[in-house]
Image: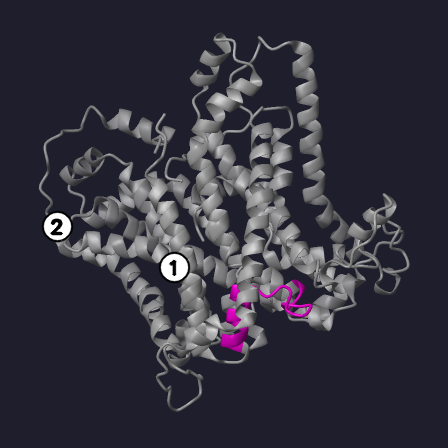
Amino acid sequence: MTTLSTDELDFGDGGPEVQHEGSWYDTVAKAVAHLVLLFFSAVMTIPFVWAFLTSLKPENKIFTTIRQIIPADPTFANYVNVWMQNPLDRWILNSLVLAVGVVFFTLLLDTLAGYALAKGDFKGKSLVYTLVIGTLVIPPQVVLVPLYLEMNALNWSNTYWAIMVLYIANPFGTFMMRQFFLGIPDSLIEAARMDGCSTFQIYTRVMLPLAKPALSSLGVFTFIFVWGAFLWPLVILNDSSMYPLQVGIGLLTGRYSSQWGQLLAAVVIAALPVIAAYLLAQRTFMEGIALTGGKG
Amino acid sequence: MAESHGLQRVRRRFSGYLSTEHVESTDTDLSWYAIILPKVVLFAAILLVPFIGAFYISLHEWAPLAQTHPFVGLDNYVRLFQDPVFWNAIINTAGYSLALLVFDVPIALGLALLLNMNLRGTKFYSGAIFLPVVTSWVIVSLIWSWLYNPEYGLLNAILGAVGLPQLSWLQSSSTALASIALMSIWKHIGFNMVIFLAGLKGIPDDYYEAAIVDGANRWQRFRYITLPLLKPTTFFVFIVTLIFSFRVYTQVYVMTQGGPVRSTYTIVYYFWQTGFQEFEMGYASAIAVVLFLIVFGLSILQQRTWGDDVEY
């Protein structure tokens, strides 16, 4: 993972052009490759399209018009109904607050800590680094019971903070930023010191501007991760108005077990923001995964 | 780590002004402590203390509202190893993991190789295949519950159309776990594909050019250049998939609630049920500790080969 750089994920720029291959063989190979890729693209996208088309059918006609792939008279009634009956707007707001909050604190604290671990010179540095590496292998589920008791003792259950702290504490970003900052030459820092920069000014004026690609990768990955979080919010919240979108939607299944139109409408509403962002910034999303793939 | 273009540019621009002599730091250690303190406090309060707490609680009988939490020694662990539901959960989790390793990783590698051919439309293909990765587990679980619907679902419609027997998917104890695994493979392929793709892009073109000059055909180039140089990436993908898959929970909660007849109980699902439904927190912590030991063992394996990275 540490060997990956953002430069390597460059789509479309020519690999070695192969002129020597027999052109007939090459054409067949390319055609087969296209077919396979087309097949998998279809397999990956059809479920979403199918769910969307179903959500446009009137609830009472879903089962009778199942063979009709494109709905004859599409309607947004399911969307209106599920929106009116559930605090979807509040859940979306909760999810946004959580995701943006976690991304902000993750970027801030992890760049600071990563900077100190990569370039700092202080007693106890190796101890802190050991702590980072050590906590990296703890599955988050292991801390849930004690953390639940801790949050209850603090009277923090049903707050945004209780949910956010678990994700902000994740050591992965610190590790990633340390690796990134290690690649920045010491001579740059010394030059800044000669110009009179303090340790903190070097962070704001040298390190942060250089870290932009890593920051966007870490930010995007953290956002997807927190937006999709399920178990911890489910456990620590018992006030349904505090639910993030995923928990709210996940708990709808019981009530809407046979009302697929409305359930899928809710699903489309929940999926749309992330899919839209993904379509706009496909490359950043993929780089985020390629760079941060190790995160549990 | 390869340097980014930006970094190389900065270095070129500054190289005239840089001196190699060491400049004495005017700051004391204190500013470094201030910089790292917030994260260290969070580590300690949110991860380290609760982590130790999990071991402590697992040695007690612990109901959250009880006045006392009697010490029971290793009783929870003894009970755990005699608990058929727990063994069932371990076997289910391992089976799920195995399915991901056997199907997900090779397909992801194959797709990455095809995308690495730089065909026209590569951006579209990779975008489509990666789409399930950015959507959340809850979303895809609900969509697939609809696809798996025995009477009205798309999958049975396809099976029926080609004349194959229809399945009851999530509603039968013999197919429910496999159905969850199938969906998870579908969701996870794009993730591994992108990691493989990054590994493939990291192999220098010179190697292939030299091989072409030597007359190596496509298969030989794959067999003697790509595969050996991709070994660290492959191993990394295997271990990460394994560690991820041992935490399977959300799909189970949304799609089957562990049923039918506990056929989809996984380790984390059982942990959640004992800890946060039945509030037997001592027993749940014992499950969590065992989960940690399993994942830790797998991580050791990963750390060991991490240093084995091939340098180009």
x and y percentages locating residue B254 in the rendered image: 64, 64
Numbered tag placed on residue A138 in the rendering: 1
Quarter of the image where the N terminus of chain A is located: top left
Q: Are marks 1 and 2 on the same chain?
A: no
Q: Is residue A16 above or below residue A237?
A: above
| Chain at numbered mark 1 | A
Left or right, A246 with respect to A156, comes to right
- Count of number-bearing discs: 2
Say which residue appears at 85% left-offset and 60% top-offset: A62
Amino acid of disc 2: Asp
Q: Is residue A115 above or below residue A75?
A: above
Whether pointer 1 and pointer 2 mark residues with C-beta atoms closer than 8 Å, the reply is: no
Q: In the rendered structure, which segment of residues is drawn in magenta? A: B255-276
Left or right, B156 with respect to B118, comes to right
Left or right, B309 with respect to A24, comes to left
Q: To which residue does mark 2 refer?
A: B27
- Colour scheme employed for the rendering of this structure: one colour
x and y percentages locating residue A3 in the rendered image: 38, 35
Q: Within 10 angstroms of label 1, few (less than 14), some, or many (20 or more) residues?
A: many
